Amino acid sequence: LRTNPAISICSVEWASKQGRRRPPRRKPRMMAPLSFVLLLASAGLAAACSSTNLIVQGVASEHPDCFKDCPSVCGAADVVFPLFLAQGEEAAAVEVCKDLDSWICAVEASNCSGMITEAKGLGVTMIPDNRSHGEAICAPKPPCHDKSSSVKELAASYESCFESCGKDLCNAAEAAFQALSTKGQVEATREVCSKIKTWNCPLVSQSTNCSGMMAKAASYNLTLPETSAAAEKTCTDALAATVSDSAPTKQSAGLILLTLTLAVMK
């Protein structure tokens, strides 16, 4: 068969047009220099501090060199900064002392000076100034260290007793001494009876850590019952005095309080 020359020419032209319509192949473009730099920077930040907390992320982004020089600050800040905002300085200070070396690194590193200054400016003052300061504020504190001198002295003489009975005993002793100094022994006794559940700890522990502690309080002019039986009698007498001395409107309240107190003792 012979091919028609006209058809052959048209076929060639059609194929040529189709070829021109194909998009040219492009080589893969390289990442823009700025994007590449930002990617590296974010990778470096992630390596310096992997915290998911937004507060710590913000601090780390402003002070990346600090977190690189002291990597453990990442975990320390992840605990302390949110806790400070949620519960205050006292709770955060406990955590600072638990990881003191991390914070010492930060206060001694020149790249962290800006972060420390900003943190203290925002009220995070529990961060120590240096190692000796940190060791001093983180040293174990004796029981009742924040109470009046009488309570502190009593607690110092019976440290094991106050440690075993807990902070509630410090508070109860402080309230009793306060009542004694302002209103006298009768009111101090009523104060003791209102917290007899707390005072039961040293009463029950007379044979161990607290032996003699209740008697020692007498040297500070505070008379305390020395046994559970004595406490029950003391509070019963206080109940009778409350009923006889109070006005009718106050009798019921005093009677209910001391009756409930005696019920707790039993």
Image (cartoon, helix red, strand yellow):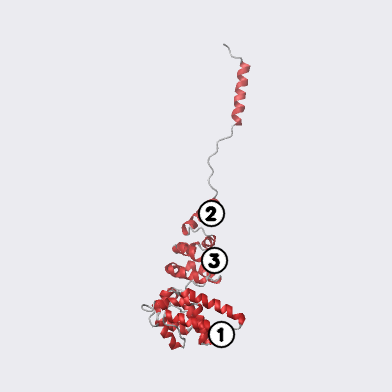
Mark whose residue sits in front, 3 or 2: 3
Asked if 88 appears above or below 142 in the picture, the reply is above
Please state which of residues 114 and 6 is positioned toward the viewer in this rendering. 114
Tag 1's secondary structure? helix
The percent position of residue 171, horizontal first and vertical second, equals: 49, 78
**Label 3 secondary element:** helix
What amino acid does circle 3 point to? Ala
Residue 244, label in figure: 1
Q: CA gap, disc 3 to disc 2?
A: 33 Å
How far apart, in angstroms, are the residues tagged by discs 3 and 1? 48 Å
Question: Quick one: label 2, few (<14), some, or many (20+) residues within 10 Å?
Answer: few
Q: Mark 2 to mark 1: distance in Å?
A: 81 Å
- The residue at the point 50 percent across, 76 percent down is 261
Read off the residue under disc 3: 86
In which quadrant will I find the N terminus? Answer: top right
First in sequence: mark 3 vs mark 1? 3
Q: Please, is residue 111 above or below residue 196 in the view?
A: above
Instruction: Specify whether 217 is left or right of 18.
Output: left
The label number, if any, that marks residue 38 in the structure image: 2
The reply to whether callout 3 and callout 2 are in contact (CB within 8 Å) is: no
Q: Is residue 72 above or below residue 260?
A: above
Q: Is label 2 or label 1 in front?
A: 1
Question: Which numbered disc flags the more N-terminal residue, 3 or 2?
Answer: 2
